[in-house]
Image (cartoon, rainbow, N blue to C red):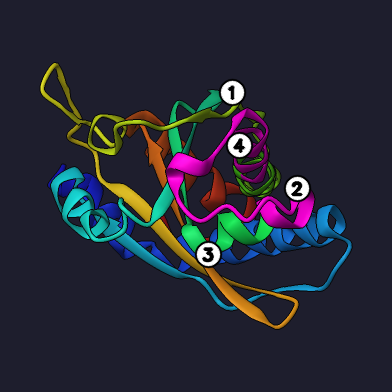
Amino acid sequence: MDNFTTLLNENLDILKEIGSIGMGHASTSLAQMLSMKVVMSTPSVYIMSPQETSDYLKQRSETCWAVRLGLQGAAKGNILQLLSKQFAVKIINYFFQNNVECLGDLDEMSLSVIQEIGNITSGAYCNSLASMTGQLIDISPPTHSKNIDEDIGLDKNKERNSPLVIINNSFFIGDEEVNSDFLFMPEDETIVMILRELKRYYGFTA
């Protein structure tokens, strides 16, 4: 993992650029979905091991809803989208006005809205990545994540060794700021492919 962690950290500016472009497209899609102004601040990008990610997310797991998607096509791996309670509640109440306050209040329709948010933001990120690398990259249908440690590779039956890319975003929806963590979890071969293709198409050092 150390070699891949070093490789990603050396190319952090590239990952930030992808994150900015992808999440910028996501904010545009959210604005269209909500028919209101959505502005995104510059995202923060971190490279972490699965254990570091687990520790980072422990304080968020009780106040976030997580959506899991798989990478398909030229990229292999997974995406985990963590929506802050404030973010999810604002979107759900916009559509249904049912005053959701906690995870236990979610019905099937509310869960579908959260999954659609994950689908929109993850799709926008992957579309940007596909455009920048010249590769066909798609995502699987979103599902609700019930075990974050398992999804990031700390499941006792299948331990992940590769580093994760965490993109922390702040969106301003109307006059309210809401937060989201986007976990990009590519397999080792996908990490190499992404950095190789970015170098080929844009002259980045990778």
Pointer 1 and pointer 4: residues touching (CB < 8 Å)? no
Between 174 and 108, the residue placed more toward the observer is: 108
The dot on residue 86 is 3
Name the residue at 31% across, 64% down.
10
Pointer 4 and pointer 2: residues touching (CB < 8 Å)? no
Magenta stretch contains residue 95: yes
- Looking at the figure, which quarter contains the C terminus? bottom left
Magenta stretch contains residue 125: no
For residue 117, side relative to residue 10 (left or right): right
Please name the residue that numbered disc 2 is placed on: 96
- Foreground mark, 3 or 4? 3
x and y percentages locating residue 94 in the rendered image? 75, 57
Q: How far apart are the alpha carbons under marks 3 and 1?
A: 26 Å
Name the residue at 64% across, 79% down.
176
Q: How far apart are the alpha carbons under marks 4 and 2?
A: 15 Å
The dot on residue 140 is 1
Type of amino acid at the residue the image marks with label 1: Ser
Name the residue at 61% across, 24% down.
141
**Which quadrant of the figure has residue 170?**
bottom right
Q: How far apart are the alpha carbons under marks 3 and 4?
A: 15 Å
**Which quadrant of the figure has residue 37?**
bottom right
The kind of secondary structure element at disc 4 is: helix
The kind of secondary structure element at disc 3 is: helix
Please name the residue that numbered disc 4 is placed on: 115
- Looking at the figure, which quarter contains the N terminus? top left
Q: How far apart are the alpha carbons under marks 2 and 3?
A: 15 Å
